[in-house]
């Protein structure tokens, strides 16, 4: 009897000790009416935790389920966290904030990911990585598990753009199974609430220079009777919109520079007179369109610069080292000087055109010759006015006039939380 009593006490002590050990891993499952597959995912996650001998919890971030998903989670011992704000990202953020583990592994609750195979994720996290992404293309995608359009077009294109825009090492931006250090991801101050949350996490982790790696992950068909929450066209657009909005260079700067280059080349080509190419005559009408391209391109470049500074001040993009150095020299006064020079040049061209008109006693003129002066002059006036106005707007966004000052860093504003050392 004493041996039995001692054994019971020892078992109770072991269980008490296990409960008191800090939770190392939280497995977060976003959930919206996933009754058909939620139980399978919870049991697989619990089995993985036992096999790995890791102190873990399973969190179901419920987004308003009405099919009994909450009851299933309660019955299986998972912790249910209600998230009233709808959206994939909102549910995950709610679960991550409620997590008590040092590490978090998130995965869809539709039984498409194998939670019993999370060992490599835990190993990488323990090895010092901040974000461990699953790679479905490296691990294997079951037949019919991913629509052809998403597999061959959507995911490769969006991932390719993410790698191009942000120099990210991730080869599968949208894998739903990933692990990370909870504090590292919370420090990113992620904002999106929809499916684009998957892209935002990778982008912000990349620009903040977190340690990122990938492990092969399989994707299965899941439950065939389950209605998918994925809307390929809408969700794809939201991912693309996010990538463009967070990369002013690719959204504004590079297209603007391209337009300005083509427009300037066309303007210089047509200034001497009409050009004939294979029987087609290019004259002042083409010159007008070329100057319009310069104006539109210049506006796009200004948007890029203004958007960059605004994003810095709001903490939405990282503060680089090169850009602030430029603004130590390109001050408000310099911008005003450049703008006024352009305006004076344009005004001089307009005066010259007026004098030529007066020489003709204000009578009819050769439009082909006169407009070659008027169109570039008006373009210079327009660009000069834009530079002057943009220079004042830069000052409003926090560009100080003293040469030693640069843009405010995000940390100097109430909402700034994303200051880093890496340039976009």
Image: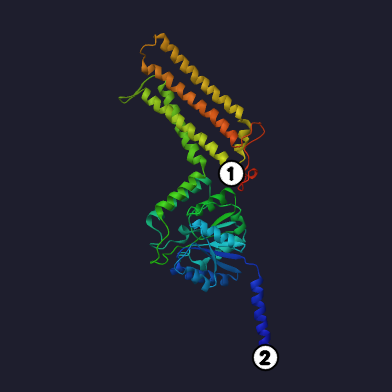
Circle 1 Cα neighbour tier, 10 Å, few/some/many (<14 / 14–19 / ≥20): many
Quarter location, residue 281 = top left
Nearest to viewer (mark 2 / mark 1):
1
Residue, x 50% and y 48% (percent of image)?
A: 163
Q: State which quarter of the image contains the C terminus.
A: top right
Position in image of residue 408 (x %, y %): 63, 39
Residue, x 44% and y 68% (percent of image)?
A: 67
Placement of 328 over or under 169, stated as above or below? above
The residue indicated by pointer 2 is 1
| Residue found at the far bottom of this picture | 1
Position in image of residue 399 (x %, y %): 61, 35
Placement of 203 over or under 16, stated as above or below? above
Position in image of residue 345 (x %, y %): 51, 20
Is residue 123 shown left or right of residue 243? right
- Taking depth in this image into account, of 58 and 262 the one nearest to the observer is 58
Is residue 292 shown left or right of residue 80? left
Tell me, for residue 3, which label it has, or none.
none
Give the CA separation, mark 2 to mark 1.
69 Å
| Labels 2 and 1: the sequence-earlier one | 2
- Taking depth in this image into account, of 203 and 393 the one nearest to the observer is 393
> Are the residues flagged by discs 2 and 1 in contact, CB closer than 8 Å?
no
Q: Secondary structure at mark 2?
A: loop
Placement of 183 over or under 59, stated as above or below? above
**Visible in this render: residue 299?**
yes
Q: State which quarter of the image contains the N terminus.
A: bottom right
The residue indicated by pointer 1 is 314
Q: Secondary structure at mark 1?
A: helix
Circle 2 Cα neighbour tier, 10 Å, few/some/many (<14 / 14–19 / ≥20): few
């Amino acid at each position: 009897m004493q041996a039995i009593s001692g054994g019971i006490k020892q078992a109770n002590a072991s269980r008490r000790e296990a409960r008191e050990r800090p939770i190392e891993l939280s497995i977060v499952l976003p959930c919206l009416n996933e009754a058909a597959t939620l139980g399978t995912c919870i049991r697989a996650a619990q089995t993985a935790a036992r096999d790995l001998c890791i102190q873990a919890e399973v969190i179901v971030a419920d987004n308003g389920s009405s099919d009994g998903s909450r009851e299933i989670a309660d019955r299986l011992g998972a912790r249910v966290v209600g998230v009233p704000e709808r959206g994939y990202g909102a549910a995950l953020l709610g679960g991550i904030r409620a997590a008590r583990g040092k590490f978090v592994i998130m995965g869809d609750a539709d039984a498409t990911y194998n939670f019993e195979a999370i060992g490599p994720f835990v190993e990488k996290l323990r090895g010092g990585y901040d974000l461990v992404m699953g790679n479905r293309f490296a691990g294997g995608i079951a037949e019919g598990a991913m629509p052809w359009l998403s597999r061959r077009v959507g995911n490769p294109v969006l991932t390719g753009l993410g790698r191009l825009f942000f120099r990210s090492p991730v080869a599968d931006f949208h894998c739903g199974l990933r692990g990370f250090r909870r504090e590292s991801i919370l420090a990113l101050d992620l904002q999106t609430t929809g499916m684009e949350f998957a892209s935002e996490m990778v982008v912000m982790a990349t620009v903040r220079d977190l340690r990122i790696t990938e492990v092969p992950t399989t994707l299965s068909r899941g439950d065939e009777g389950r209605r998918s929450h994925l809307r390929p066209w809408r969700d794809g657009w939201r991912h693309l919109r996010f990538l463009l909005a967070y990369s002013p260079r690719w959204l504004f700067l590079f297209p603007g520079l391209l337009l300005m280059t083509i427009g300037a080349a066309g303007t210089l080509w047509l200034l001497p007179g009409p050009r004939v190419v294979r029987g087609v005559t290019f004259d002042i009408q083409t010159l007008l369109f070329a100057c319009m391209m310069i104006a539109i391109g210049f506006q796009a470049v200004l948007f890029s610069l203004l958007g960059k500074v605004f994003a810095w001040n709001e903490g939405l993009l990282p503060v680089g080292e090169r850009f602030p150095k430029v603004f130590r020299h390109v001050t408000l006064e310099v911008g005003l000087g450049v703008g006024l020079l352009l305006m004076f040049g344009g005004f001089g061209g307009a005066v010259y055109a007026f004098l030529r008109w007066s020489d003709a006693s204000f009578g009819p003129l050769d439009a082909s010759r006169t407009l070659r002066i008027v169109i570039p002059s008006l373009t210079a006036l327009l660009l000069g006015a834009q530079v002057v106005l943009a220079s004042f707007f830069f000052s409003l966004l926090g560009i100080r006039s003293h040469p030693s000052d640069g843009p405010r860093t995000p940390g100097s504003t109430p909402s700034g939380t994303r200051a880093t050392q890496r340039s976009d």
